[in-house]
Image (spheres, grey):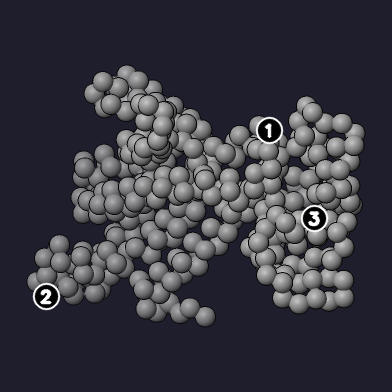
Amino acid sequence: MFGVVTVIFFLFNVLPGDPAQMMLGQNEDSEQIAAVRAKYGFDKPIATQFLYYLNDLSPLSFHSNHEDDYTFLSNGKYKHSKLFALGNTSVVLKYPYLRESFTKQGKKVSEVIGETLPNTAVLAISAIVLAIIIGIILGIISALFKDKWLDKVIQIFSTLGMSMPSFFSAILFAWFFGYVLHKCTNLEMTGSLYALDDFGETMQIQWKNLILPAVVLGIRPLAVVIQLMRNSLLEVFNQDYIRTARAKGLTEFQIIKRHAVKNALNPVVTAISGWFASMLAGAVFVEYIFGWNGLGKEIVNALNTLDLPVIMGSVLIIALLFVIINIFVDVIYKWLDPKVKLD
């Protein structure tokens, strides 16, 4: 996480443009720009700005007791608990502070992410669940009918799924199912999870708007799961304990359910974890094309307006989710394979 923080800070802070002018828009003057630069530390050397940024992100941070100090000015930006004082410096415990958006009139980045990340999570979870269920079933069928016509059809489908870019699939599905077949499917080309009712007063959940983006986002991981499940299951079928189970008279269904599937899931779990984490970041094109108000669409809007705090905060949250998901997958490995030890 420290590496990610370092890279994104120096990457985005060498971009052309004045953050103070971005925050003030068209109403700035020289005094206002100077005040904003002093308030947020933009007038400091880049190394000092980096230390300020780390101080804002760290749960344990240091704040000067002098009112004219930048670190004290950021004191009112978040709730904190004072632990102890070291001379003129106070050590406080707080939530990580991702700063404020340049374009949303002082709105905190954490609030922007909090409003959009749940929508992305719903989309990613729906897509990965779809990919897991259908992918494992088709992978098992493909392995059972190896080299038969059914296996070949499934292989063609999975190959097309892996080779088709998400943005192209999104455009194709939106046009075909949301426009051409709209009367049959009752699906819209664009739409988010929440939409205003007919009177424009309350927000209502529109589950039908989830169908197309979830299918499009799940196509590529679905194809990967099919291939991995098929190949892994074929390898397991050649193991001695499977032959022993057949010799004992167990049916093919019992062998697959009790022995084969669980032992074939390790590579599938690895792929699923990576794809689920990447979906949280890779849903950018899908969300933007379908008008899904998630973190991916917010990142695109932030890039268009050079809203650097939103971009940096979003990347940090996505990186943190990568770490958490990988740790969770290690725990799942232990359940799937008792020989794996968590040191």
Q: Which residue is mark 2?
A: 248
For numbered disc 3, what is the local secondary structure?
A: helix
Check if mark 3's residue and mark 1's residue have beta carbons within 8 Å.
no
Q: At 88% from the left edge and 56% from the top edge, which residue is drawn?
A: 68
**Disc number lying in front (1 or 2):** 1
Q: At 45% from the left edge and 52% from the top edge, which residue is drawn?
A: 276
**What amino acid is found at the position of numbered circle 1 in the picture?**
Thr
**What amino acid is found at the position of numbered circle 2 in the picture?**
Lys
For numbered disc 1, what is the local secondary structure?
A: helix
Asked if 75 appears above or below 171 in the picture, the reply is below
Precedes in sequence: disc 3 or disc 1: 3
Q: Which residue is mark 1?
A: 305
Precedes in sequence: disc 3 or disc 2: 3
Depth order, front residue of 204/211 = 204
The location of residue 321, given as percent across then percent down, is 53, 58
Check if mark 1's residue and mark 2's residue have beta carbons within 8 Å.
no
Instruction: Locate the N terminus and report the quarter of the image it occupies.
Output: bottom right
Instruction: Determine the image quadrant of residue 75.
Output: bottom right
**What amino acid is found at the position of numbered circle 3 in the picture?**
Leu
Asked if 27 appears above or below 229 in the picture, the reply is above
The location of residue 115, given as percent across then percent down, is 52, 45
Instruction: Determine the image quadrant of residue 175.
Output: top left
Precedes in sequence: disc 1 or disc 2: 2
Report the Cα–Cα distance between label 3 and label 2.
75 Å
Q: Which residue is mark 3?
A: 73
Report the Cα–Cα distance between label 1 and label 2.
67 Å
The location of residue 284, given as percent across then percent down, is 53, 39
For numbered disc 2, what is the local secondary structure?
A: loop
The location of residue 267, given as percent across then percent down, is 40, 61
Q: At 36% from the left edge and 47% from the top edge, which residue is drawn?
A: 126
